[in-house]
Image (tube, rainbow, N blue to C red):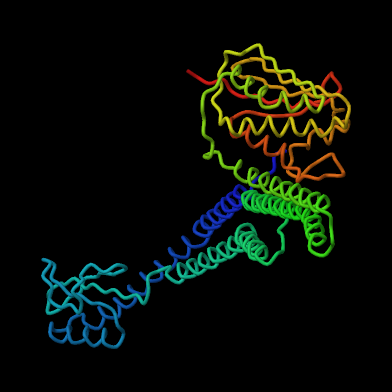
Amino acid sequence: MKKLSSKTIIFIFVVILLAVNSGLLFSYYSFYLSDKMTADFSEAKEMNRESLYVIASSVEGKGLEEATELMSLYVKNNGGNITLRSLDGDVIYSNSNDNSKLFSSTTVVEIEDENYELIYSKFEMTPGSSRIKNFIFYEIILVSSLVIILFFVSSRKIIDPIDTITKDINNYRFGKRPFKRKMPKQMQQIQNTFVDLVDALELEKESQNQIIASISHDIKTPLTSVIGYASRLKTSNLSNEKKESYINKIYDKALMMKGILEEFDDYQSCNIKETLKHERISIEALFKMINDDYQDELKDKKINLIVKSNCDSKQINVDLVKIKRVFSNVITNSVTHFKGHPGVINVSAVFKAGMVKIEIADNGGGIANEKDLKRIFEPLYTTDPSRKISGLGLSICKQIISAHQGRIYAENNQIGGLSIIFWLPVASF
């Protein structure tokens, strides 16, 4: 059975209360108020008739002047409204401008041998008014109770969750992380979204701290060597050959630190898509550049570079400098895994469904652990326990390819190594 939302529950609750209230009002009026109002009306009429009888008896047979004086004296002592008028409708005496009083009683009296119409009315309050007052009081109590109940329900369903979310936001400013809670649906969605956002921020902060720590660690190692060699140059009597050796080592270590910092700069700059400078280039021209850049270098390291494509004429719209950086990072990463034995690096391209698939495959042993295979594009992640670089190379590749609306992944290949595969969209004409 589908669970009702808090809004639906409150709506049903209000409808039930209104229905009960309407039933009580109808019963109150039908079985009590209407009878009481009728009885009060009859009682008021009867009292008017009795008063009219007293007045008529006192003025019957009197002179007109004496009769009006008696009527004036009666209303002065007893209150009420008296009107005396001829049968033709002319008003002889009246202590009120309103000659059509509700609950009035009328009779004919003889004054100075002429008949007159005597009208009297008196009521302290409208018949049934006390009951109406009770009814209004009852309604005020009922409505007030309903408002109080709704306030507490809304407080529990709306106000309290808002207070909780506000407290979590304030607490997060002081380092206390929020957590997901059971709340009404809409409030829970806000709370959980906030928690997810905090988790993402904390993950990003942790990643940044890890990157900073990694860069610091990677720089400290060569920097320590630089300081050590520089100290020896200052304090020892060294031969020219030894001095030159130390100077060369200091230079090499400085280049290593420079490479680490450049890699970090590349990682930061690759986050910005707006920095891309697109140009159209064919696969044939791109692969010729890659072959010219790496053929001789890899040959000296006894690594066979094979570049081939079945879609030379296809063109892609890319930032050439950054795409060449992808090839550089992947090929450099492959070279570190050959460990002295003759290696092969195959660079190939095929065209499929409007995309160019480029694969850089080596025979350097691959990655046996499936978990490692999925994580190699994460910043700072490396499968090499003796890591000597910051581990941002493949992460930079992923950012570059993603910025070009492509995708990149890794898999073990059939030649005994790792393949880095990325897809790039073909340039539209």
Q: Residue 301 sits in which quadrant?
A: top right
Q: Seen from this angle, which residue lies furthest front?
A: 240
Please state the horizontal and vertical placement of residue 14, each as a whole percent of the image. 57, 53
Identity of the residue drawn at 12% across and 79% down: 112
Relative depth, front residue between 396 and 206: 396
User: How many numbered circles are shown?
Assistant: 0
Residue 182 shows up from this direction? no
The one of 340 and 71 positioned closer to us in this rendering: 340
Q: Residue 237: horizontal and vertical position, in percent?
A: 84, 61
Residue 310 position by quadrant = top right
- Look at the picture and state if 420 lies above or below 94: above
- The image quadrant that residue 58 belongs to is bottom left
Residue 265: x and y in percent read 63, 47
In the figure, 23 relative to 394: above or below?
below
Q: 375 or 387, which lies in front? A: 387
Give left or right: position of 122 versus 354: left
Task: State the image coordinates of residue 187 (x, y, percent, origin top left).
Answer: 63, 53
* Rendered position, 291 above or below 190: above
Q: In which quarter of the image is the N terminus?
A: top right
Please tell me which residue is depicted at 59% across the width and 51% down the height of the picture.
16
Direction top: furthest residue: 310
Q: In this view, does 419 lie to the left or right of 135?
A: right
**Residue drawn where x is 61% and y is 13% of the image:** 312
| 86 with respect to 1 (left or right) | left
Residue 52 in the figure: left or right of residue 325: left
Would residue 216 be seen by someone viewing this image from the given angle? yes
